[in-house]
Image (cartoon, rainbow, N blue to C red):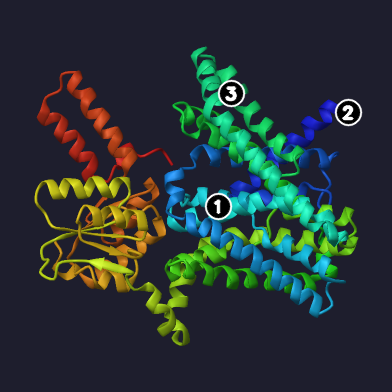
Amino acid sequence: MAAGHSLIVDFTTVLGASALGGYIANKFKQPVLLGYLASGFIVGPFGLKLLSDADLIKSLAEFGVAFLLFALGVEFSLTELKRVKDIAIGGSLLQIGLTTTLVTLITVVFGWASGFPQGIFLGAVFSLSSTAVVLKTLTEKGETYTLHGQIMLAILIVQDLALGVMLAILPALKQPEGLVTALFLALAKVIGFAAIAFILSRWIVPGLIRNIAATESDELFLLTIIALCLGVALITAALGLSIEMGAFVAGLMISEIDYADHALAKILPLRDTFASLFFASIGMLIDPIILIENFGLILGLVTLVMFGKALIVFPIVLKFGYSVKTAVITALGINQIGEFSFVLALTGLELELISQDTYLLLLGTTAITLIITPILLERAPKLANRLIKTPFLFKYLRRFEAPKSLSIPETINSHVVVAGYGRVGQVVVKILQSQGYPVIVMDNSEPAIQRLRHRKIPYLFGDADSELVLEKAHLEKAKALAIALPDPGSTRILLERALSIAPELDIIVRSHSDKEIDILTQMGAKEVVQPEFEAALELGTHLLKTLGEEQNQIYTVINNIRTDRYISIRPDR
């Protein structure tokens, strides 16, 4: 078969297998990411060997990483980042530094490394986590904008920036006397690139995008977006920095202009298509022979790495003032070895910092940690709740669950409690205050609390689903509870705990998807609001008015839809 046809066959095979694997994973209520990984292993060189050129597929998979990070950059909000900026920088550096130091000491002391250079190298490999896997999992769960989601992504982005520095100083590990020079050059590259990116994003890219958009040609617009994403990624790769860093910065360049949402909509199908290739390519790296021959060793390494990194991240998150639940979810979310550790490992092999056998062990260990990550993230909230209730840890951890601060009048009564002071929560509070109703707001974001202090609105600073926080909200004296949290898991926990304190409380809940409407209703919510459906109802109301329908008839139609929990307008299942 011609080479061109061979590529098409390989491409179709991987995409078809990924679609089937994702479908099966979804049917078993598992993240589709696991299906992609499994499908890659099955069709890859260690499985059924259905690909004639697996290396070419792995090269194409780099598009997936670039598009994933580009989309993150477009969606990324610097305002949102400000609320986690301290842990983004300080926490990331602490995590990288502690992980590298501990791995170096352990590997050297136990003789797993031939010396400190190799120990430092292994520490650098283990210190990186997977932006692609974590981002994909958070996106599937709808938790990108939750507090723990923002913390994870902020730490991961700093890790990606650190990758460029690590790649630059690796050669110096063979010649330690050149370490300072290598570090200086790496930092100079990062600073130089940042300066160029700032100039492009301020004076060149916005004008370019506006001119292309003015042509009203979707093809030109899409081609320009792809060229920008891959072009900046290639520049960072040429500088010895990471592709991830370049793609993310390219996304940031257009995140603040008017056409950001249009660009994101255009790139999402490409992102999802090539991302499935990327995760399948990771599955192709799993060599069952290596796993079987070194099963005990690899299992021990996976346990040591994931448990050890979680133990490092957990106290760091607590140190920066976040709750136990946030610390546990974050620790279990970024305790894997990152896909770009493959790049470091390959560089280390070429520099003879590690042997071929060690390289293969690292690949196997990394692949397994990536497979386990979505499962851990799915179960992290329940694990956090169990951890808090563990008898020997109860007294120590419970103090982190208490409100960090509060401002509530002692005489408050017949008030409304609003959980979450984001975009939805702020509107709810304004409506209630405009009619003179007393409110208490619960939020775990310092910027949100600062706004509440400034506006002299009673507040509780802490996780709204924490029992200790709820105890201070006087739910037994409240008229109603409005839940407007960005995290579906926290929403369900809060609803359950609030009803256990005040069974007759009128609770209104924001649903994140149509699947949750019935669940939240069955749990006891008096009213479940789905934002997308409500927007559609408002559009429908105005259209019916325009078409001359009577006000009473319009009210009846819309009210029936709401009373029936949107069943008549939900998408076909």
Residue holding disc 1: 137
Report helix, strand or loop for mark 2. Answer: loop
Locate residue 355: give its quadrant.
bottom right
Question: Which amino acid type is marked by label 3?
Answer: Leu
Would residue 375 be found to the left or right of residue 113 on screen?
Answer: left
Residue 52 % position (x, y): 86, 39
Q: Earlier in the sequence, mark 1 or mark 2?
A: 2
Between marks 3 and 2 in the image, the one whose residue lies nearer the viewer: 3
Residue holding disc 3: 222
Number of numbered callouts drawn: 3
- Classed neighbour count for the residue bearing mark 2: other residues with Cα under 10 Å, few (<14), some (14–19), many (≥20): few
In the foreground, 141 or 185: 185
Q: How far apart are labels 1 and 2 at the CA level?
A: 38 Å
In the foreground, 19 or 309: 309
Would residue 204 be found to the left or right of residue 521 on screen?
Answer: right
Labelled disc at residue 1: 2
Q: How far apart are labels 1 and 3 at the CA level?
A: 26 Å
Which quadrant: the C terminus? top left
Question: Which amino acid type is marked by label 1?
Answer: Thr
Between marks 1 and 3 in the image, the one whose residue lies nearer the viewer: 3
Above or below, 510 relative to 230: below
Residue 388 % position (x, y): 43, 77
Above or below, 469 relative to 482: below
Report helix, strand or loop for mark 1. Answer: helix
In the foreground, 425 or 174: 174
